Amino acid sequence: MQKINIAIIGGTGYTGVELIRLLSRHPRARICYLTSRSEKGRKVSDIFPSLLGACDVPYSDMTDEMMVQIGKNCDVVFFATPHGVAMTHTPNLVAQGVKVIDLGADFRLQNLDEFSKWYGLEHTCGDVLAKSVYGMAELGNTQRDDIKSAQVVANPGCYPTTAILGLKPVIDEQNQQNEPLILPNIIIDAKSGISGAGRNAKMNLLFSELSDNFSAYAVAGHRHHPEISQGVHELLGSKFPQKIRFVPHLVPMIRGMFSTIHLTLTDKGRAVDWQAVFEKTYQHEFFVDVLPKGSLPDTRSVRASNRLKIAIHQDDDVLTLLVVQDNLVKGASGQAVQNMNLMFDLPETCGLDMAWGGVAVVP
Ligand SMILES: NC(=O)c1ccc[n+]([C@@H]2O[C@H](COP(=O)([O-])OP(=O)(O)OC[C@H]3O[C@@H](n4cnc5c(N)ncnc54)[C@H](OP(=O)(O)O)[C@@H]3O)[C@@H](O)[C@H]2O)c1
């Protein structure tokens, strides 16, 4: 069976290590290169003992020479790096026919001004950006086909994955009925585990600052806000403008994300059976579970899996959506492997169809 030769740039970060975990069990994947500027020469299992026997590739420095080798020998490169890194190297990789999946934000926002405003950088490859595809297969079969034929895929942000997939059935139904079913005021109250902030030594990420504590951040504006808005208005093509209020919080747990989406229904919207609409929308999606009426999902139930679970609570003019996922899997590396599967014409679930959740799962 022919293998897919893979490089992971940023193989010591939380999403990079999660890619190693998933790809080391993927039947068609062969990890050939891992980069880390700070851990060059060390083996994965020296730093992450849980991966002993899973991957013996040593970390390499990310030099120009190394990038040339990667370009020559790899079929796909995952960038699990901060924004700004992928766009520097992607044009060369694309020119060599290599596919790129960026877990960072370089190819997520199609509007160059928005990108500069939120990320404080000028985009350096607008032409590549214009041809890149937002890697969220569950947006529908057109998106899925675009991912299949893409050379560069922007892996979605973690919060936007919960928000956009949570809102999709509502926006689609509203577009179909061609009438407002919700008031144009969407509130997304979102919580993330601390791994969402990356594997960094920062004062606010210290155990004594975070444990036994709960806080909101970026209330005035978060980088994922324009991505959610792009998802609602452009990818889902909402016929009606939506004002989106998005407030993220940090929860003292390592991994997991919980977004509560508050919507107010119009008279027309009240008449809709939203449970049925959500079930129909996602009936063929392996990675999206619409839970039975009245369910209360929790983050543990999706831990280490590529599943996103949604519960719908409808009461008079109030529609509340509870959306959970693992920020490092469906919110990052699992969705990236799902995209790789599509780009290489493999079953979407290849390497991702595993048991998950439970009380004592230690991924
Ligand atoms: N954490 C999440 O839940 C999550 C979810 C979705 C998306 N994302 C996105 O995914 C990307 C990676 O996130 P993460 O949480 O895995 O980050 P992280 O834990 O901070 O790891 C970053 C990795 O990139 C390397 N790196 C840092 N600066 C670099 C540079 N200038 N050039 C090359 N390599 C560099 C680091 O290793 P060295 O410094 O040793 O080179 C490290 O391996 C980010 O863009 C993030 O926004 C994260």
Image: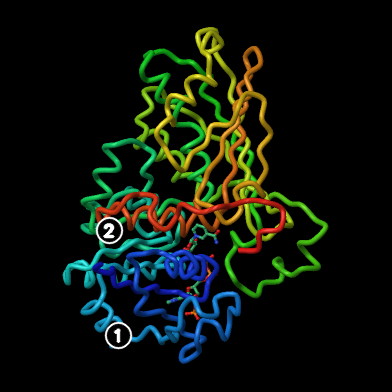
Q: Quadrant of residue 90?
A: bottom left
Q: Amino acid at mark 2?
A: Val
Q: How many marks?
A: 2
Q: Residue at x 35, y 37 (%)?
A: 235
Q: Picture quarter containing residue 310?
A: top right
Establish whether ligand 1 lies closer than 8 Å to the Cβ of label 2: no
Residue at the far bottom in the pictured view: 41
- In the displayed structure, does residue 267 sit left or right of residue 240? right
Q: Image point 50% across, 89% down: which residue?
A: 42
Which label was assigned to residue 43? none
Mark pair 1, 2: CA separation: 20 Å
Whether residue 223 is visible: no
Report the side of 71 relative to 264 (left or right): left
Q: Is residue 238 above or below residue 333?
A: above
Q: Quadrant of the C terminus?
A: bottom right
Q: Which mark is residue 64?
A: 1
In the image, is residue 137 above or below residue 68? above
The one nearer the camera, 177 or 54, is 54
**Residue 101 lies in what quarter of the image?**
bottom left
Q: Amino acid at mark 1?
A: Asp
For numbered disc 2, what is the local secondary structure? strand
Please, is residue 173 above or below residue 284 in the view? above
Residue underneath mark 2? 152
Q: Position of residue 253 (x, y in %)?
A: 71, 57
